[in-house]
Amino acid sequence: MDAECSILVIDDHEMIAQGCQNEFARAGLTWTVSWFRSLRDVVWPAGRALVILDLRLNDGTRPAEVIQELARRSIPVVVYTSCDDPVPIREAIAAGAASVVSRGAANQDLIDAVRAALEGGPGAGHDWARAPERDESPAADGLSDQEVQVLALYAGGMKSSRVARTLGLSVPTVNTCIARIREKYRRTGRPTAGS
């Protein structure tokens, strides 16, 4: 899980990449971090890679298009942003982002999101789960009672293991619920312009 990996930070601010490198090193992770202003500037590394992407880029690209291109390359994406508008968050998830983590979240939340994305599991970032409550998303209409309960606790910041204990479920059941919720959320994402 924590083996060597190239983390490509696509962000207008180089300081984000420097901060990520410092936090990863402090956590004892061997991930190397490279910074790029846009997808077209990326120098693709050999081996395993993951992209940390901001939703607010000044390069004229749309984040959903960047995420779709990275998905075509089988590169997982963790959105790390100060954007709290539910529309681009929902579009990012619909395009294939593994997680959305707020820049106001704890550093460990970003590390957990990157680890989860590298493992291919449900995203550790909780901000995607909060988007339906901030927007009139049709995703919430298709959730089962159990999924609503899981979503309420998970969106409140609980980890899967604590949600499982609180609801008397197993951790795999909670993770399956989260994966189903994310998939329902992806399917109800608004189409992007030109789609």
Image (cartoon, grey):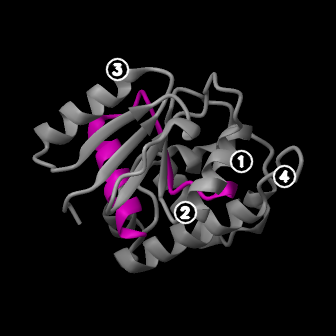
Disc ID at residue 91: 1
Q: Are marks 4 and 2 in contact (CB under 8 Å)?
A: no
- In the image, what residue occupies the spot 63% across and 22% down? 58
Tell me the residue at 51%/32% (across/down). Answer: 81
Name the N-terminal-most of marks 1 and 2: 2
Residue 88, position as x, y percentages in the image: 70, 39
First in sequence: mark 3 or mark 2? 3
Q: Which is more foreground, mark 4 or mark 2?
A: 2
Q: CA distance from mark 4 to mark 3?
A: 32 Å
Residue at the (61%, 27%) spot, across then down: 56
Q: How crowded is the residue under tag 2: few (<14 C-alpha within 10 Å), some, or many (20+)? A: few
Residue under pointer 4: 191
x then y, percent, for residue 97: 56, 54
Amino acid marked by disc 2: Arg
Camera sees residue 86: yes
Judged left or right of residue 3, residue 34 is right
First along the sequence among labels 1 and 3: 3
Residue at the disc numbered 3: 15
| Cα distance between the residues tagged 1 and 3 | 26 Å
Amino acid type at circle 4 is Pro
Q: Is residue 42 left or right of residue 39?
A: left
Horizontal and vertical percent position of residue 98: 51, 57
Residue 181's spot in the image, x, y percent?
A: 62, 66
Q: CA distance from mark 1 to mark 2?
A: 19 Å
User: Mark 2 sits on what residue?
Assistant: 73
Q: CA distance from mark 1 to mark 4?
A: 7 Å
Amino acid type, callout 3? Met
Q: Amino acid at mark 1?
A: Glu
